[in-house]
Amino acid sequence: MHKEIYELASEEQLKKYAELAVRAGVNVQKNQLVIIHSDIQNVTFARLIQTAAYEAGASNVFIDWTDEQSTKEFYLRAADDAIDYFPDWQATRFKEWDDAGAAYIHIISENLDVFKEVSSERISRFQKVSRTKLKDYYAKIRSHEVRWCLLAVPHLAWATKVFPHLSQEEALQSLWKSILQGARADGKNPIKDWKNHDRAFESRKKRLNDSQFKALHFTNSRGTDILVGMPKNHIYIGGGVIDKKGIPFFPNIPTEEIFSAPHKNKVNGKLVATKPLVYRGCVIDDFYLIFKDGRITDYYAGTGQDTLQSLIETDEGSHYLGEIALVSINSPLSQTDILFYNTLFDENTACHIGIGNASPSNLQNGSNLSEEELKEAGLNISLLLVNVTFGTKDMKVVGIKEDGTEMLLMKDGDFQF
């Protein structure tokens, strides 16, 4: 099937998309090691990225192949003790890659049904042990010590879910068009387009960072009414980020968000999700979260209640928030008016929160602070970070300063500054 998928996009488009991942996404430097994480079904695109990385000066480009069907068999049939085991050599190779200064490119392709027969409890257990073993790697990712980029390509199951009334070929063509449009990879010079896109974030980030709001108040007609307290000296990030060596990169393609880290213990109210959350191959939909003093104290999902429970109960930190993001409902991606059933795309169509770990980069000098110092400053620590979209066309966001002064930040889902 992968040949049919890649025949539905021109070679020129695919090469530009691959080059965007390499030169803007991770911004490959001369003689740098590049790691590409890809399922075997995406061999065509992975090899295009590999070629683009070598052309950009990479010293070695290693493709870390996965196979979703083999992973499914593991979850279904592996011995119970194997589910709770993650080999040391897996963690060791990530450390060796990190020590070598590797850049990481992740190709994702949503297949919503692949794990529908699998116990969410077994998936949760394995994910927990693997994330624990790779804790140092994820810490480097969150602090932008290493450069990484996440981008998507179509999958037949994904395309027919997003476009159920089209034929398989038409659905795949439509999903390709939407992905490339949302990723700003459909123009003559995508890299130049992304530089222009990045500049558009700067004035809003400066206004937010200068204001240092004590809290953000979100309300809409869907039932969301939540007050999100912010830590002192917080920083908003959006568009491109800078690694510890001063090299810019884009972790997500697409990206439309301006985000920061809320204070772990200062989130109160109700948040109603407006788009399904795909978590570990399972769909969570029609759900809400209740917060008191930062902690999720109650929750409900019309679909995927067990999966939502396993997410929240991953560890103590997964009962709290690590991210709050402002996204205009009028962004090009949002204007597609498509429900993507994919977090990378759906979270970039409207405001969202992140359950779990906060990025040290969202705090002044945060990357130089210890875990205890980050906790003391109000940042949450967790094994995971999972984003939940809750923005709407009537979303209102008010920034509240220390002296009680209020500023209207968003009205009808769009920025007012």
Image (cartoon, rainbow, N blue to C red):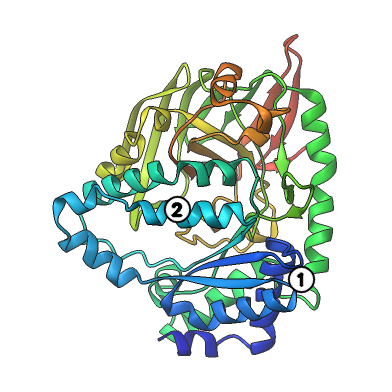
> Percent x, y for residue 170?
49, 84
**Could you tell me the amino acid type at mark 2?**
Thr
**Could you tell me the amino acid type at mark 1?**
Pro
Q: Quadrant of residue 30?
A: bottom right
Instruction: Tell which circle, 2 or 1, labels the residue nearer the N-terminal end.
Output: 2
Q: Quadrant of the N terminus?
A: bottom left
Is residue 39 placed above or below 321 in the rendered structure? below
> Percent x, y for residue 80?
15, 51
How many badges with numbers are in the image? Answer: 2
Q: Residue 190's mark?
A: 1
Is residue 385 placed above or below 290 in the rendered structure? below
> Percent x, y for residue 326?
65, 40
Q: Residue 168's mark?
A: none
SS at mark 2 in the image: helix
Is residue 350 placed above or below 410 in the rendered structure? below
Residue behind mark 2: 92
Q: Quadrant of the C terminus?
A: top right
Front-lying residue, 297 or 85: 85
SS at mark 1 in the image: helix
Front-lying residue, 267 or 68: 68
Q: Quadrant of residue 14?
A: bottom right
Residue shown at 20% from the left, 53% from the top: 82
Residue shown at 72% from the left, 31% from the top: 235
Q: CA distance from mark 2 to mark 1?
A: 36 Å
Residue shown at 29% from the left, 37% from the top: 309
Residue shown at 67% from the left, 33% from the top: 367
